[in-house]
Image (cartoon, grey):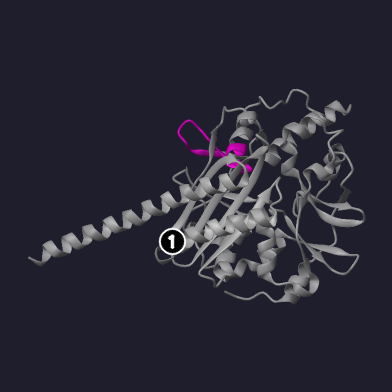
Amino acid sequence: MIVMDAETLKELIRDDFEVINANETVSKLFPMLEKLDRDKANAILVEEDGKIVGVVREKDLIRGSVLKNPHETKVKSLLVRTGKIDLNELDPYKVARRFVEDSTPFVIVQIDDKRVGVIYINDFLSALKDEFKDVKVREVMNPEVITVRRFDSAAKALSVMRTHGIDRVVVVDENNKVIGILTGKDVVDRVISPRKRARMGDSSGEKEKTLSIMVESIMSSPVVSVSRNDSVAEVIDLMVENRISSVVVTRDGLPDGIVIKKDILEYYLKKESRKEFNVQISTADITLDEFDREAILEDVEKLMRKFSDFLGESFLFIYIKRHKEHFRNLPLIHVRLKLASEKGNFMVSGESWGVEYAVHVALKKLEREILKEKELLEDKRMIKRFYEEVLEY
């Protein structure tokens, strides 16, 4: 792959971003988000005590507590604490890693003691595009497409997103043909924000839109789609030109996969890494302490060492999200695992009370999937040997 130098990265740094104080109420966010240039981002930097401490993302506004009390809920309750990259330590691997770990539309760069800048994900992907000319969509796509029906409610779509730990669903018709896509951001833009404006006396607010509205009425359509044999460079162009964060992979109109920007960056990280196996952990609504992180890495290492000969060079992405439910002081945790290996991609998810148990549940599922693939390949080899032996006589 072509190596992007630090000077090229420095040229991508921009200072056109919005900032909000962590102690402001969420209601102040809505007008700020509506003014954002959609070519850039759907997130706002958050400052506290004069320092940038992270971001607040538009997609997080779909939480129940936010919808009920926007004039009381503080911005700090939605804060995603992100890492920063020092200007003198810029390299494409670090930038890509920050995008994946923080799940934000920009990476924060510390220019000096007082100033920060940002690198927007679209600018970064455009700079990387030439490295993906010979990479096919099938190599980066997620084949697990989560769908809803056109007549399902927006509330059901949000429930599906929450259950699967995702922020978008593909909309299909009665014949399972792809007809649209709905994101959490769409729900904010087309249902939640208009209702908030209406409550604040703005006559342009659409009072009649509630979460019972059908998905078909608020989905984005037609869908920007590609085939599994298209190049990822073309996908990047489509994402940037159409101001979208995902494309649907279709075959004869049926859903075949989905590609989001994070998938492309994960592939890049995997190719740039030279270790036998790598682990990337990203979180939502939860901060892992060193004990949790070390315990997770220890469990992961046991599993990866166990199958290292079979899997070859591997990259495991771990996504951990906390739900609001609690049981005996333990939060309900959703864990999604994506393992990219020489034997293919494996994707599983699991839920349980507490981080340790939730990760354990997901790792057990992953182990079963690896074993199934291993047994399948062994069966195929046995059949091949059987026929080779038969043909000798």
Residue shown at 48% from the left, 38% from the top: 177
> Which of the pair 195/88 is nearer the observer?
88
The answer to whether residue 139 is seen in the rendering is no
Q: Would you identify the image quadrant in which residue 187 lies?
A: top right
Considering only vertical position in the picture, is 294 above or below 21? below
Residue shown at 68% from the left, 40% from the top: 184
Q: Give how far across and how far down residue 5 sits, in percent.
A: 70, 76
Residue shown at 17% from the left, 60% from the top: 386
Q: Give how far across and how far down residue 13 sits, in percent.
A: 79, 66
Considering only vertical position in the picture, is 177 above or below 198? below
> Which of the pair 358/98 is nearer the observer?
358
In this picture, which residue range is highlighted in magenta?
Answer: 161-179
Q: Is residue 172 magenta?
A: yes
**Residue ID for mark 1:** 306
Q: Is residue 256 magenta?
A: no
Say whether residue 285 is left or right of residue 51: left
